[in-house]
Image: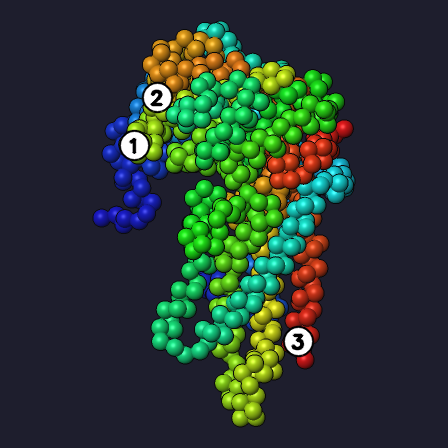
């Protein structure tokens, strides 16, 4: 009997596979190639933990399996916290290894433009079929020469407010101008129901409130040439002075340290009467109708309405957080990754995901405004046209790296935060302009 | 043929013997034993450090290899008001927390050095803040400081001490102090347990002799315990200063450096620029700016330790 050693064992175990025209493990090792069965392309998709858990649930339980079947690939979905996405993207790009598709938030894809594969063909197809992308999607996922990321969705940011408390304070209709909102805030705070707003270092709500406020008073960080910094203007000072007064008169002053979840908790616990938010507060109240009640014992979901940020002397604006998917330049599976994104954004497939979002995420193209979803719940109706109202961070300049630097240093947010904490408006604006100039190198 | 075979058989054995003999040379043996440590230090300390210096001297962005720009990044951060705030915050944060951690840690160590029932249990319990993963315990603190749901505010209000909420992390003056409290809470056990180990090496006979000579407890501590504990204290403080100076997790979880940069430290600002903005070179320059300050602190402390030991 021959001696059985490790090498013989490998050959013997391969015996059964000989029938299947392979040479066993030894044969596989000798060819240096994986057997056919293991050659299925795996696409690694890294995205955030959806604020609407049902969004990730339908992907994991249903849609990924459908995609695997339709495309003949394997899909590996990994979800992480929003604030960790950039760290992961940076590490992957520097190491030239990692997920094949990485989600980017707002204008972050512009920071990684050189490391993104060209997805122009795919985006142009989607745009053609679905009524064209909104300007805000194009400004953030296209670097002027090509599409660097595939627009995923727009998260409408609207003010969620308590109808009964507004009625009680004699405010029948949601304020249309900032001055009216300030008056409303005064009345609401007097009744123990202040407005809540984050002015902290947090990626979502704080900048999405501060930038539109600045724009609606006529202030801007840079001119359209992307070089002339003109933040220190009469208009900016007016915006800061307005916010300082509004803060004291109408706001919950704890907001200076809030992150993106504090206002949700404060609203759902009945501490604040209004706050700028994605629709996550309302959706959470729908998800657990008996957990969140008004002081009258009624379900809170029936007492929530939404409205856009008010108008200022220079107009009405909003920033609606934008998400897109980068196919990474280092990826060896770019073809499969693009095929997957193309499949995902085909109307019949995307519609399944879009519907479970219940309006929290709106489509990046105009055709999604026509979805029947918007007729289901009138409370969500204001989110329908969020994509049309949005401007991008860095306005009036481009949404490039300089704008991202100003945003990630929280210069505009801190300009307001410093003023509400006691610094003179003129001083806060002067400080912010100095910092913005350094970012733009002027 | 037979001779050849014998030489073939014998040669590996002879070579092995020769190798073993070579190891009897202390210099070679030392080199061999130190090699793994050297490789590890080289890979995980020296290489990242040198890469960091190189990055700081270029204009590298994420995914874009940069060109050499000399000290441009350092000039930019020198003129950056947020960087200056971060420098001051880091120095103040390190100083205040180190003083408190040392004082409270020493106090705790002296108490734990006494004999009492349940001593082992209490000693283990004291280590808890140090054992729990920092991010986890910091999240608990974040809830305790929450402007709306703070249990601390609730307690103070119930006790009738306050009538309005305290904005622990939102008030620019209070925010850094709140972060310091968490750092002190987390760092005291490290001091306490290490100093306790130091206390246990001090012979009780010295205390007895001092007591017989009429020394009061405070005098026994000052003239017997403290001088003997000093070398250990210096080493613990050295480690702690380095760790505190480069602290990141606490601030990142509690405030992200806000409000309005009131709690911005070296590490959080380096992260914000390097990762948030993709300016790896500027992030590296900020991290590297820590080095001269830390280097000076370490040199001073090591010199002092040597002086104390050779006394």
How far across and down, in percent of the image, does residue B209 sit?
54, 91
Q: Which residue is mark 3?
A: B308
**Residue at 74% of width from left, 22% of height from top?**
A228
Q: Mark 1 — on which chain does it sit?
A: A
Q: Mark 2 — on which chain does it sit?
A: A
Q: Mark 3 — on which chain does it sit?
A: B
- Alpha carbon of mark 2 to alpha carbon of mark 3: how far? 69 Å
**Residue at 51% of width from left, 36% of height from top?**
A252
> Quadrant of residue B129 in the image?
bottom left
Whether A367 is drawn above or below B220: the answer is above
Please, what secondary structure does the residue beneath circle 2 have?
Answer: helix
- Alpha carbon of mark 2 to alpha carbon of mark 1: how far? 28 Å
Q: Which mark is residue B215?
A: none
Neighbor class of circle 1 (other Cα within 10 Å; few <14, some 14-19, many 20+) is few
Q: Which residue is mark 2?
A: A356
Q: Which mark is residue A297?
A: 1
**Residue at 49% of width from left, 27% of height from top?**
A276
The answer to which of marks 2 and 1 sits earlier in the sequence is 1
Whether B119 is drawn above or below A66: the answer is below
- Residue A179 is left or right of residue A334, and the answer is right
- Residue B300 is left or right of residue A192, and the answer is right
**Residue at 72% of width from left, 35% of height from top?**
A427
Whether residue B189 is visible, yes or no, is yes
Taking depth in this image into account, of B206 and A98 the one nearest to the observer is: B206
């Amino acid at each position: 009997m021959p001696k059985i050693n490790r090498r013989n064992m490998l050959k013997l175990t391969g015996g059964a596979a000989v029938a299947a025209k392979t040479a066993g493990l030894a044969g596989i090792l000798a060819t240096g190639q994986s057997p056919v069965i293991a050659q299925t392309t795996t696409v690694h998709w890294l995205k955030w933990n959806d604020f609407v858990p049902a969004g990730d649930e339908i992907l994991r339980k249903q849609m990924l399996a459908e995609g695997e079947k339709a495309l003949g690939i394997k899909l590996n979905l990994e979800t992480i916290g929003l604030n960790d996405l950039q760290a992961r993207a940076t590490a992957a790009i520097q190491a030239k290894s990692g997920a094949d598709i990485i989600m980017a938030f707002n204008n972050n894809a512009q920071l990684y433009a050189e490391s993104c594969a060209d997805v122009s063909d795919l985006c142009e197809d989607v745009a053609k079929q679905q009524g064209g992308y909104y300007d805000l999607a194009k400004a953030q996922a296209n670097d002027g020469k090509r599409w660097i990321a595939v627009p995923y969705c727009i998260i409408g940011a609207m003010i969620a407010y308590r109808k009964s408390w507004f009625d009680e304070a004699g405010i029948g209709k949601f304020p249309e101008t900032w001055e009216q909102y300030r008056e409303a805030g005064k009345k609401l705070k007097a009744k123990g129901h202040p407005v809540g707003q984050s002015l902290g270092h947090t990626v979502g709500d704080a900048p999405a409130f501060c930038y539109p406020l600045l724009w609606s008073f006529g202030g801007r960080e840079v001119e359209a040439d992307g070089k002339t910094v003109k933040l220190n203007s009469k208009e900016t000072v007016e915006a800061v002075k307005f916010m300082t007064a509004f803060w004291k008169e109408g706001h919950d002053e704890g907001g200076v340290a809030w992150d993106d979840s504090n206002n949700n908790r404060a609203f759902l616990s009945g501490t604040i009467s209004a706050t700028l938010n994605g629709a996550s507060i309302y959706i959470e109240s729908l998800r657990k109708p008996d957990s969140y009640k008004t002081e009258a014992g009624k379900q809170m979901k029936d007492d929530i309405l939404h409205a856009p940020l008010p108008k200022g002397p220079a107009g009405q604006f909003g920033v609606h957080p934008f998400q897109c998917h980068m196919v990474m330049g280092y990826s060896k599976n770019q073809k499969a990754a693009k095929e997957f994104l193309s499949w995902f954004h085909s109307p019949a497939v995307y519609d399944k995901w879009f519907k479970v979002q219940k309006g929290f995420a709106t489509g990046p193209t105009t055709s999604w405004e026509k979805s029947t979803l918007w007729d289901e719940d009138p409370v969500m109706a204001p989110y329908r046209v969020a994509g049309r109202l949005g401007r991008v961070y860095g306005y009036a300049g481009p949404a490039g790296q300089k704008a991202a630097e100003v945003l990630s240093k929280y210069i505009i947010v801190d300009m307001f935060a410093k003023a509400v904490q006691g610094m003179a408006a003129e001083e806060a604006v002067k400080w912010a302009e100095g910092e913005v100039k350094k970012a733009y190198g002027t | 043929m037979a001779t050849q075979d014998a030489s073939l058989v014998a040669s590996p054995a002879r070579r092995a013997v020769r190798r073993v003999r070579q190891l009897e040379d202390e210099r070679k043996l030392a080199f061999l034993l130190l090699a793994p440590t050297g490789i590890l230090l080289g890979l995980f300390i020296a290489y990242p450090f040198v890469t960091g210096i190189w990055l700081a001297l270029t204009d590298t962005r994420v995914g874009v290899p940069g060109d050499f720009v000399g000290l441009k990044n350092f000039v930019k951060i020198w003129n950056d008001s947020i960087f200056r705030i971060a420098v001051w915050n880091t120095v103040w944060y390190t100083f205040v927390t180190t003083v408190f951690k040392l004082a409270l840690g020493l106090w705790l160590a002296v108490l734990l050095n006494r004999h009492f029932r349940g001593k082992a249990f209490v000693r283990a319990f004291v280590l808890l803040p140090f054992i729990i993963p920092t991010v986890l315990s910091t999240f608990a603190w974040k809830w305790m400081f929450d402007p709306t749901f703070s249990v601390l505010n609730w307690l103070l209000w119930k006790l009738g001490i306050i009538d309005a909420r305290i904005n622990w992390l939102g008030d620019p003056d209070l925010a850094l102090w709140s972060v310091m409290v968490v750092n002190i809470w987390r760092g005291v056990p490290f001091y306490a347990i290490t100093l306790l180990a130091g206390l246990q090496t001090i012979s009780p006979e010295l205390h007895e002799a001092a007591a017989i000579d009429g020394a009061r407890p405070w005098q026994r501590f000052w003239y017997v315990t403290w001088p003997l504990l000093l070398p250990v204290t210096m080493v613990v403080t050295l480690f702690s200063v380095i760790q505190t100076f480069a602290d990141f997790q606490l601030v990142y979880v509690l405030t992200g450096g806000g409000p309005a940069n009131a709690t911005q430290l070296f590490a959080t600002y380096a992260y914000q620029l390097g990762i948030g903005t993709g300016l790896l070179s500027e992030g590296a320059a900020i991290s590297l700016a820590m080095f001269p300050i830390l280097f000076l602190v370490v040199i001073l402390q090591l010199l002092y330790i040597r002086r104390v030991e050779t006394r």
